[in-house]
Structures are given as structure tokens and as C-alpha cells.
């Protein structure tokens, strides 16, 4: 079953990997032409227009975008976190539910396999693809950056793995929510909406100390990119919280799926 | 004493406040083909899906081979072959890939039986599932239900979509399974096929089993249609004390449950132009229960 699950979800994985790679490839290709002394002057002028809070939201108060890696760490990573967030949410929301939506669950359930084993297979495949997306995209970035400039490998590696801490909980939460639904059509809105809301809450929490508490309501707080950029380390608490949330929602998925009416 | 393989005791299923099944109790013995019949919405598929563990029962008990069915019991799943009324399989696979995939769950070599069934049902292994017609999809469903040589077969409307020749092939296949001792629950609303193949039938209506009997008894204790044309028809209608089934300008059809001697005695008083005694088709036999 694992082999089939890997095959079925491969296309979706390739699409998202290509989205990320093409987007970054375009930036890497045009960057040397944009980032000239004159070009940087224009960009600096442009950035002065933005309030400090907005620059902070994109980590541009910590890092200059005068290098490709600088861009990756700032604007680039906003896109990476959102894209990987969408991928993980959608994968979690559909990987199990698709069997019901396609009505193949009636066949699958008749086979000598327990519901828990069905969930296990889906979870393993989901986690494999999430990690593979982050790994392959990281490798691509590493190669591209190596060709163009010098950069801190440690900082790059730490930065590249931060999406894991939002991707796994988003996968787990949406997997659990999908056990309350019967059609994947309904999950698309939930998955995308959840990513946007979490991202927005995290962004807002950085704008002012008055709304800093909002960070406790956002999964995106766990991808603490600011901390990675400023201290070149990952807060172990974020890793633990991320894994605990993922674990709890996957366990809840098992409990709920074992009681679910499948047709 | 015959060995009970499937037993349902007061099985009940409600979807919120709406009724799925109210009270279904039945016993199916080893090597028996049990016809499960009833109109649409009576609760046939709900009963089957409850046995298959797709939906949770509200109350009641299910026993397989004398043991209460546990939730998601793979040992039971291993001995059951299931053919749902509406087959949905993985569209991206070819038939050969799907059969191999199916085989992988049973951890034993099913290739011999698989080949036999594919040959018998004339299945093209290279076709993609998404390209199969309804009939061919049904044939693949039959192979999936039978290839692991199950001890129990649960078939929900198994012949829908099959052409008459293939229906006969399928029924012969089931009779051979029966000879091997396979126990079969055969749900259908096509009464003639049930009467041809089943040993016993249970009639479900509004979520309850309202009649259960051997097929032979049902055929035996039935009544006949009495078709009469007579100038004294109004007098006959009043005096003969039989229910009227249908009435036209020229004739009246009565539902006759009288023994032959009694019938002749009663009719001898009248001047009858035409008299015809007909066997009641099985459909009509059950229609009274359906109403």
C-alpha cells in the first residue's frame, strides 16, 4: 500500500517542488542584473518608503537583499513558508479523505487491513513527501547559491529546515480536520484559509508589542526565521512544540478515523 | 444441525434521526445462498455496510462463525469477499495492476484462482480501470471478491450491469462456490434471479425483516391468479369471497388461496364464459409485502 500511496501523491509533490524551484530559479537568474550598485540605490530608496514594522515582517530589518542569500532569507522565505504551508495543509487535508471522495474507501476497507494501518500508511507518505520537498528544495538552493556567492552554510542549513516546524503541524491539523468531512472539495478552502490566517497572525504579532500575544495563536511562530538569522540557531522549544502538536493531531486522527462512518 | 456462519441479532442503524435499519435479525448457514431482497431504501445496503464495518451500528449484534464481530477485524476481512452495488476502484491502475495490488494484501499466492476467474469472465487485463464499462467494472469486482477464495461472500446487487450471458456465468460460479461450502449473502431486488439461485430469502421492508423462508416454501404456499369472464361477474364478486387483484371491462382477476376442490365447488354455481388459473409471478408475490 505504501508504494501505491507514494505513486499516487508523486504528481502533487512534483508540482509543488516545481513551483518553488521555478520561482527561485527565476530570481537567481535575474538577480545579478538587478543587484548592481545603481539598482541597489533604487531599492534602498524604495525600502525607505516602507514603515519599519513592514520591513520587520519580511525580516528586512535584519538582512540586506543585496545578495541572493539575503533575498532568500527575507522575501524569499516568506514565499517558501507560505508555499510549503499550502502544500502540507493540502496534503494533510486530502491524503486520507481522497479515498472517501473517490468512493474507493469501500474497496479499501474490504481488504484485510485495519483503519489504523490505512492512517499509518498515509501519514508516513505525507511526512516523507514533506521532508523530501524541503530537502530537495534545500539542495537546489544550496547548488544555486554555491554557484553565485559565498554564504554561511550553517545559517543556510538551519534556515532550510525551519519550514519543517510549520509543515508537520499543518499536515497533522488538516489530517485531523479531514476526518470530520466526506468531500475533499470542502478541505481546499479550509487548508488555504488556515495557512493565510496563521501567517497573518504571525505577521501582525511582529508589528507591535500590543499584539505580540497573537503569535501564540499561529503555527508560523514555530518557524522562527528571525531567530535563525540573528543567532544562527534554532530554538529547541519550537522543535518540541512543533513535534508535540503534530503528534497530538495524528493521534487524534487515529482515534477519530476509527469511529468514522466511511460512506 | 447446520452451522451458522452469519448471524445478525436485532441490528439497528440510525443516521442521526433518520432510519437506516430498524431491526434486522437473520441467520445464514454454511454453504447457503441467502437472498436478501427488498425495495429501494428498505435497508439492504445499510445492513451490508454495517456488516462490512463501513458504518457503525446503533445497536444489535453481528456474529461471524459464532463469534461476535469485533471492529475492524482483519481475520474476518480475510475470509470475506465483498462486491458492493456500486464499484469504485483506482482509476489510474490497469486491471492487472489492481489485481496484483489486491493480491498483495493477502500474503499468499492467488495467481491460479486469479487466472481462472479472468479467463472465465473474459477480462482484458491491460485496460485501465477508468476505461472500463459498467459491466466490465462489475466483472473486475467479481474477480476481486472471489480471488482470495473467501469462505463468505457478501454481494450487493451483483448482476447490475452484467449482460444475461455473463449473469448466467456468474450464477454458475456462485453455485460452484456454494458446493465448496461458501456462505453467500445475495442482496438484490431482481426477484427472478433470487428465486433461481437462493436457498432461502429474507424480505426487508422499512428496515425490518418482514418475511423469511425457504425459496421452495415461498413458491409452494403461494396463491394463484383466477381470471374470470362471466355475465354474472357482479354476483361472483359479491359471493366468492376472494380478494380482487385487477378488474377490467371483460374480466376480473381474483387472488385465489382456495384448494382446488373448494374452488370448483364455489365456481360451479355460476355460468362462466372463461376461466384461467395462473401462477403468480414472484414479483407479484412479494409486491404485497412491499406495499
Image (cartoon, rainbow, N blue to C red):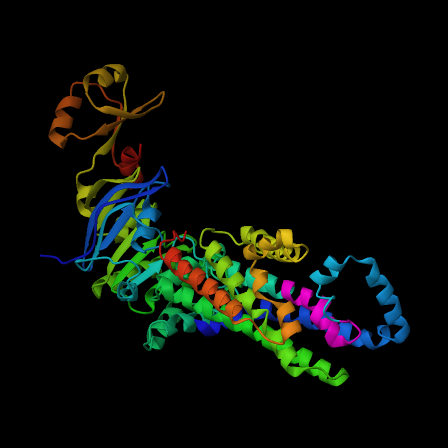
Q: Quadrant of the N terminus of chain A?
A: bottom left
* Residue drawn 25% across the image and 16% down it: B232
A234 vs B97, nearest the viewer: A234
Instruction: Tell me: residue B47, above or below residue B248.
Output: below
A32 vs B76, nearest the viewer: A32
A114 inside magenta stretch: no
Instruction: Tell me: residue B200, above or below residue A253.
Output: above
Q: Residue furthest right?
A: A38
B59 vs B265, nearest the viewer: B59
Residue A197 can be seen in this image: yes
The number of callouts visible is 0
As drawn, is A163 to the left or to the right of B213?
right
As drawn, is A188 to the left or to the right of B146?
right
Instruction: Tell me: residue A137, above or below residue B286.
Output: below
Residue B125 can be seen in this image: no
What is the magenta range? A64-82
Residue B278 on image: x %, y %: 26, 35
* Residue drawn 53% across the image and 67% down it: A238
Residue A192 on image: x %, y %: 60, 55
As drawn, is B217 to the left or to the right of B234?
left
A72 inside magenta stretch: yes
Q: Residue furthest front?
A: A209
Instruction: Tell me: residue A69, above or below residue A252.
Output: below
Amino acid at each position: 500500500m505504501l508504494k501505491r500511496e507514494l505513486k499516487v501523491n508523486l504528481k502533487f509533490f512534483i508540482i509543488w517542488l516545481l513551483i518553488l524551484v521555478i520561482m527561485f530559479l527565476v530570481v537567481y537568474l535575474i538577480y545579478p542584473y538587478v543587484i548592481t550598485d545603481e539598482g541597489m540605490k533604487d531599492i534602498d530608496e524604495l525600502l525607505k518608503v516602507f514603515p519599519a514594522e513592514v520591513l520587520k515582517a519580511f525580516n528586512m530589518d535584519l538582512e540586506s537583499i543585496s545578495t541572493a542569500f539575503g533575498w532568500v532569507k527575507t522575501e524569499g522565505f516568506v514565499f517558501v513558508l507560505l508555499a510549503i504551508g499550502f502544500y502540507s495543509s493540502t496534503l494533510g487535508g486530502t491524503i486520507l479523505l481522497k479515498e472517501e471522495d473517490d468512493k474507493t474507501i469501500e474497496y479499501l476497507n474490504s481488504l484485510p487491513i485495519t483503519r489504523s494501518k490505512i492512517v499509518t500508511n498515509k501519514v508516513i507518505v505525507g511526512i516523507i513527501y514533506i521532508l523530501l520537498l524541503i530537502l530537495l528544495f534545500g539542495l537546489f538552493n544550496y547548488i544555486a547559491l554555491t554557484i553565485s556567492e559565498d554564504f554561511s552554510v550553517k545559517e543556510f542549513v538551519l534556515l532550510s529546515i525551519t519550514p519543517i516546524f510549520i509543515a508537520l503541524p499543518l499536515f497533522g491539523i488538516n489530517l485531523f480536520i479531514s476526518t470530520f468531512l466526506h468531500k475533499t472539495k470542502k478541505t481546499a478552502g479550509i487548508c488555504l484559509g488556515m495557512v493565510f490566517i496563521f501567517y497573518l497572525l504571525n505577521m501582525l504579532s511582529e508589528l507591535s508589542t500590543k499584539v505580540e500575544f497573537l503569535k501564540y495563536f499561529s503555527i508560523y511562530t514555530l518557524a522562527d526565521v528571525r531567530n535563525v538569522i540573528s543567532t544562527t540557531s534554532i530554538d529547541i522549544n519550537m522543535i518540541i512544540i512543533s513535534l508535540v502538536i503534530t503528534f497530538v493531531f495524528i493521534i487524534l486522527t487515529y482515534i477519530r478515523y476509527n469511529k468514522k462512518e466511511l460512506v | 444441525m447446520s452451522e451458522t456462519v452469519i448471524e445478525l441479532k436485532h441490528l439497528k442503524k440510525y443516521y442521526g434521526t433518520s432510519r437506516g435499519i430498524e431491526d434486522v435479525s437473520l441467520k445464514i448457514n454454511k454453504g447457503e445462498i441467502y437472498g436478501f431482497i427488498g425495495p429501494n431504501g428498505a435497508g439492504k445496503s445499510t445492513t451490508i455496510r454495517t456488516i462490512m464495518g463501513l458504518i457503525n451500528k446503533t445497536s444489535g449484534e453481528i456474529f461471524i462463525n459464532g463469534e461476535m464481530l469485533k471492529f475492524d477485524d482483519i481475520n474476518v476481512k480475510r475470509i470475506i469477499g465483498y462486491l458492493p452495488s456500486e464499484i469504485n476502484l483506482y482509476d489510474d491502475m490497469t486491471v492487472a495492476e489492481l489485481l496484483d495490488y489486491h493480491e498483495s494484501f493477502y500474503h499468499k499466492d492467488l495467481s491460479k484462482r486469479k487466472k481462472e476467474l479472468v479467463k472465465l469472465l473474459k477480462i482484458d487485463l491491460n485496460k485501465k480501470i477508468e476505461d472500463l464499462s459498467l459491466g466490465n467494472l462489475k466483472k473486475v469486482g467479481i474477480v476481486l471478491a472471489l480471488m482470495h477464495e473467501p469462505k463468505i461472500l457478501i454481494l450487493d446487487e451483483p448482476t447490475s450491469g452484467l449482460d444475461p450471458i455473463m449473469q448466467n456465468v456468474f450464477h454458475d460460479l456462485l453455485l460452484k462456490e456454494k458446493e465448496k461450502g461458501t456462505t453467500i449473502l445475495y442482496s438484490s431486488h431482481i426477484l427472478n434471479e433470487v428465486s433461481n439461485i437462493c436457498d432461502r430469502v429474507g424480505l426487508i421492508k422499512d428496515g425490518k425483516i418482514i418475511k423469511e423462508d425457504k425459496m421452495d416454501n415461498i413458491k409452494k404456499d403461494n396463491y394463484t391468479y383466477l381470471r374470470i369472464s362471466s355475465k354474472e361477474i357482479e354476483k361472483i364478486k359479491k359471493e366468492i369471497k376472494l380478494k380482487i387483484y385487477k378488474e377490467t371491462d371483460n374480466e376480473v382477476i381474483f387472488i385465489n388461496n382456495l384448494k382446488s376442490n373448494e374452488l370448483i365447488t364455489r365456481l360451479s354455481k355460476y355460468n362462466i364464459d372463461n376461466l384461467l388459473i395462473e401462477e403468480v409471478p414472484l414479483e407479484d408475490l412479494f409486491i404485497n409485502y412491499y406495499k
